[in-house]
């Protein structure tokens, strides 16, 4: 970008900021419920100063150059924050696109008498702003991905509680689909708890698992095998009729694994494996 | 009624040491007429196919000499890895810790009051 | 893929295996890998290093921390100048062994890592490369 043009734009910073802010506020896409105008003003001013400074460097057109580092930082910050706050992609990209519009207008006004230069400067400005626009979208998507990743890990943590139901007996109610990632989390949590509590028996209740295909069955078998290697036995409970049907139709071999229809019958089995007897106490008058 | 042998493996073994352990232990079973062997691997951070084979061998050899083998204290990470590797150590009994291993041996041998223990301190 | 660190580790005798495994553990810990994944990587490395010692009398290993799409991982390369493998496809099958082992070495090691590559030329030697990513399953 031409040095004079850059200097001119720098001189007009105040006006540019004003028009740009006006554009942003005017745009229906801006939601003041997500961000106050004052906040936006401060953010925009910081960004514009950095950008106009970068225009003034010899490598103005190379958005990967050192002069653009603070700009990338601000931009990434803005779009990641917006992604987290729930702004739409349109709302996020408007930020940079509305500035592009203002800058074009300014250039047009200044260089009206020199079409050749105007064309060149517009081109150069467009190139810079487009590349920044791409940075915005890239970081926006990254921000969204982070949100999704965090939620996924939260869900898998919440959904794998290992419960100590009796001395030496653990229960693990599995709710939701068992994929490879989740099996690993479930398996690790269960085995750790087996060691921590010296529990000889673990009941894996799959009442909350929507479907059992051969992959899920394989995951369950692996968990049982790992527990056995450590010296603990697993009982799989909560096998519904349709799951039993699928297992047999798919030819999955569960003969080496203890299975029970309900958690209650699994618990009963665990008791007998540990030689524990539960009996009803003689009737007592407790006063109620 | 012979005693139980308890071996605690304190460090990760390389192959030749593992083989030495195997032969020492089997000689010890023969010498002491032990009826049970407890191998505590709670300090072992990896068991690969070779080490797995050694554990299996010890169990099979002891069995021929009428002694039961229990591997105790396998770490969760080691167990998960062994399953993925494809080793299930069939023929080897397992227990969570030495105490549960002893109980298992006593039940297997059927003399619940035997608790004479021979101690084989691994020098490795 | 970017290589963040690289070092050589020669394997000449059985005792080297323990030091080698410890070094892998240090690198894997640096990437923030979970204990289970570390154990899988070390076990796979243990199988491959044993093959090197048994069939080629040793060799050289490369230990690298790599990064792809800003996810770190550990890449290990095992290079030997031994007799090589005649039929790689067969050697990758469970239960196949020319020695007296269980035949779980190569296929087992493959199951324990995220990426596995083997190149072998009879008479020239074998090169195996494995990668385990920090978050890989």
Image (cartoon, rainbow, N blue to C red):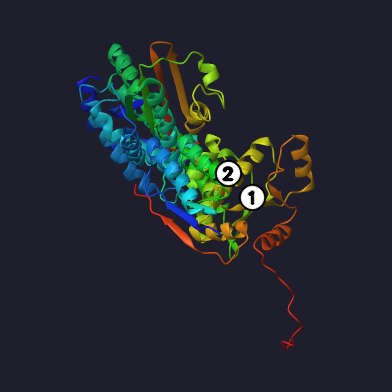
For mark 2, name the chain. Answer: B
- Residue C112 position (above or below residue C129): below
Secondary element at tag 2:
helix
Instruction: Please identify the quadrant where the C terminus of chain A is shown.
Output: bottom right
- Give the foreground label among 1 and 2: 2
Looking at the image, which residue sits at the far front? B31
Q: Which residue is mark 1?
A: A175
For image coordinates 42% across by 38% down, the residue present is B19
Residue C67: image quadrant is top left
The answer to whether the residue labelled 1 contacts the one labelled 2, judged by CB atoms less than 8 Å apart, is no
For mark 1, name the chain. Answer: A
Secondary element at tag 1:
strand
- Residue A176 position (above or below residue C70): below
x%, y% of residue B81?
50, 40
Please state which of residues B96 and B103 is positioned toward the viewer in this rendering: B103
Please state which of residues C21 and A122 is positioned toward the viewer in this rendering: C21
Q: Which residue is mark 2?
A: B64
- Asked if one can make out residue A272 in the rendered structure from this viewpoint, the answer is yes
User: Would you say A187 lies left or right of C72 here?
Assistant: right
x%, y% of residue B82?
51, 39
Tag 1: Cα neighbours inside 10 Å, few (<14), some, or many (≥20)?
some
């Amino acid at each position: 970008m031409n040095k004079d043009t850059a200097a001119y734009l720098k001189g007009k910073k105040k006006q540019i900021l004003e028009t740009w802010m006006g554009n942003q506020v005017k745009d229906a896409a801006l939601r003041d419920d997500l961000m106050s105008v004052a906040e936006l003003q401060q953010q925009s001013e910081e960004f514009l100063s950095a950008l106009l400074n970068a225009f003034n460097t010899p490598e103005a057109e190379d958005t990967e150059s050192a002069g653009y580092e603070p700009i990338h930082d601000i931009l990434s910050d803005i779009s990641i924050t917006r992604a987290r706050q729930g702004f739409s992609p349109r709302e996020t990209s408007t930020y940079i696109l509305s500035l592009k519009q203002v800058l074009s207008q300014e250039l047009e006004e200044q260089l009206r008498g020199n079409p050749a230069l105007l064309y060149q400067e517009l081109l150069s400005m467009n190139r810079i702003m487009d590349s920044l626009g791409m940075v915005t979208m890239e970081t926006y998507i990254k921000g969204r991905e982070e949100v999704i990743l965090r939620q996924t890990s939260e869900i898998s943590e919440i959904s794998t509680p290992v419960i100590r139901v009796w001395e030496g007996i653990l229960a693990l109610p599995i709710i939701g689909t068992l994929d490879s990632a989740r099996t690993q989390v479930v398996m690790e949590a269960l085995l750790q708890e087996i060691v921590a509590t010296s529990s000889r028996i673990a009941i894996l209740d799959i009442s909350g698992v929507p479907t059992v295909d051969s992959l899920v069955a394989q995951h369950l078998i692996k968990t049982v095998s790992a527990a056995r290697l450590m010296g603990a036995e697993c009982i799989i409970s909560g096998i519904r009729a349709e799951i039993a049907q699928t297992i047999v139709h798919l030819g999955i071999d569960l003969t080496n694994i203890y299975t029970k229809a309900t958690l209650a019958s699994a618990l009963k089995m665990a008791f007998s494996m540990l030689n524990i007897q539960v009996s009803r106490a003689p009737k007592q008058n407790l006063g109620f | 009624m012979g005693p139980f042998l308890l071996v605690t493996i304190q460090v990760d073994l390389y192959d030749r040491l593992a083989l030495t352990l195997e032969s020492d232990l089997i000689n010890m079973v023969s010498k002491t007429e032990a009826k049970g062997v407890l191998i505590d691997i709670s300090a072992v951070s990896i068991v690969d196919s070779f080490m797995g084979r050694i554990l299996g061998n010890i169990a099979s050899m002891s069995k021929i000499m009428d002694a039961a083998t229990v591997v105790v204290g396998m770490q969760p990470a080691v167990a998960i890895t062994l399953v993925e590797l494809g080793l299930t150590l069939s023929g080897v009994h397992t227990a969570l810790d030495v105490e549960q291993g002893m109980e298992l041996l006593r039940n297997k041998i059927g003399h619940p009051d035997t608790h004479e223990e021979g101690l084989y301190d691994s020098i490795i | 893929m970017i290589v963040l660190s690289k070092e050589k580790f020669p394997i000449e005798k059985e005792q080297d295996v323990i030091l080698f495994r410890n070094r892998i553990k240090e690198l894997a810990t640096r990437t923030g890998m979970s204990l289970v994944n570390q154990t899988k990587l070390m076990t796979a490395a243990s199988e491959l290093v044993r093959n090197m010692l048994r069939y080629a009398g040793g060799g050289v290993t490369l230990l690298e921390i790599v990064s792809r799409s800003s996810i770190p991982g550990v890449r290990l390369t095992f290079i030997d100048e031994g007799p090589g493998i005649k039929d790689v496809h067969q050697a990758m099958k469970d239960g196949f062994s020319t020695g007296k082992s269980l035949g779980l070495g190569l296929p087992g090691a493959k199951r324990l890592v995220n990426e596995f590559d083997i190149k072998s030329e009879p008479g020239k030697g074998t090169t195996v490369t494995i990668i385990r990513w920090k978050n890989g399953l």
